[in-house]
Amino acid sequence: MLLIHCPYCDETLPEVEFTYAGEAHIVRPENPSAVTDEEWESFLFLRDNVKGNHYERWRHFHGCGRYFNAVRNTITDKFLTTYEAGAPRPSIESLTEKGK
Amino acid sequence: MTRFNAFNLVKNALGGHKAWTEQWPESQPKAEYDVVIVGAGGHGLGAAYYLAKEHGITNIAVIDKGWLGGGNTGRNTTIIRSNYLYDESARLFDHSVDLWQTLSQELNYNVMYSNRGCLMLAHNVHDVQSFKRHIHANRLNGVDNRWLTPEECKEYCPPINIAKDARYPVMGGALQERAGTARHDAVAWGYARGAAARGVDIIQNCAVQAIRRGPDGAVIGVDTDKGFIKCKKIGVSASGHNSMVMATAGVRLPLESMPLQALVSEPVKPIFPCVVMSNAVHAYCSQSDKGELVIGSGTDQYVSYSQRGGLPLIEHTIAAISEVFPIFNRMRMLRKWGGITDNTPDRSPIIGKTPVKNLYVNCGWGTGGFKATPGSAHVFAHTIAKDEPHPINAPFSLDRFRTGRLIDEAAAAAVAH
């Protein structure tokens, strides 16, 4: 079972309290009517599907109910960090230096 | 390759089984091939087999980073069925079920296909309505499927609990009698043996690091652990790692790789005569010829390449199985494992051409690829040989995510595949 730290509740809790919400930092187009089919395809469907450190969204469904972002290694399933939605994307280097 | 028949069996038995030839040689890569297939699972080996047999292309290498059939081909619950709702899916999966009927004879290799039937249980009014809709749609497409009352379900599969006060009461079931199971490893071995006999090289323990493209954008070969291999065409069918392999050619795919877990119980005497699936409680179960109950459910919810998965899902699955089949609730489980499935947004596969010339992909089978092995391999071989899709896989193109012509089995079926 994954143990996940909710950055809002500031508690580390079991995976069953959370739902996964896909890749993080995918920005919705500012002006949807000006977007081409290729850009819609990329926004809606295409994913990096990273083997390694993955930026992703989670929701504390059975807790505060809020979405947040995480960096998790998809080979070991170990979380490097979690952070509030809207916060800038942390660099992998800054996370691995701390020995996490 | 020695053919398996009664004469050779007796001859070799008398000779102490010393004269059998190896089923496929340990191949080393040649400098150049007409076609390179990435991934030696059932789909990849099958594609090589049909390319050699039906399209006369025998200068083929099937390359795998691990061992043959060691990915999802060896990690699934071996369920075979074709009761899909949409016309496109019904055609694709029923093509496969057609090929399963005679696959052992075709390959001269016993894949132990057993059409023991697949029963999908309905636990609420919505299930009843949705399954009856499936049955009607299937019958219009010539796919067998029929409705059973709870009593008929119990008669067909005695371990089912149909008590009215059960937590998940059984309100009926949809039965596809042509569905069943097969021996998963034998499918990979049979195709490997058949392909090797026609001259295909099977290269194991050799990871493909990158697909190399020429100045005109078309593929020219693959960089591997054993050096560069030149080739004219590449077919990628690497299940969970499709995104990574295709990314080296500059193609992004609409895939997310997630672990799908399964588990088996201790072996017991024959008690479970068919495959039973329950979508509402989300578990499926059958009994292997060794006597183990083979149990599975849905994927873990997050992207992961660890072939393990989390325990909460196993707990959920076992709870569901114990409720529907109380007779099993004291059985001991022997093993559990995970396979990495590549899932598309519409839960239908992608088989076809890519934006890169002479690069083809067979991916996105998600949690339901095993049942499709012969049909998928057959139409993928056609696509590679003719440079255009077979009519059966034409709707399963990569560009459907741009045109919007999705084949949305996820919403329509909401099933475990």
Image (cartoon, coloured by chain):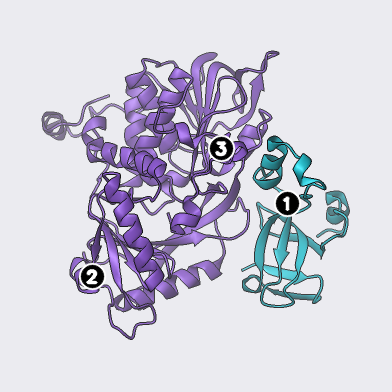
Chain colours: A cyan, B purple
For the point 59% across and 49% down, the residue is: B257
Q: Is residue B188 left or right of residue B303?
A: left
> Which tag is nearer the camera, tag 1 or tag 3?
3
Kind of residue at disc 3 = Arg
Kind of residue at disc 1 = His
Q: Where does label 3 land, which residue?
A: B400
Q: Is residue B264 above or below residue B49?
A: below
Q: Which mark is residue B149?
A: 2
Q: Position of residue B382 (x, y in %)?
A: 41, 24
Identify the element where label 2 is drawn.
loop
For disc 3, the chain is: B
Are the numbered discs 1 and 3 placed on the same chain, yes or no? no
Q: Is residue B291 left or right of residue B214?
A: left
Estimate the spatial distance between the alpha carbons at disc 1 and disc 3, rounded to whole Å.
26 Å
Q: Position of residue B312 (x, y in %)?
A: 55, 70
Q: Is residue B62 above or below residue B240?
A: above
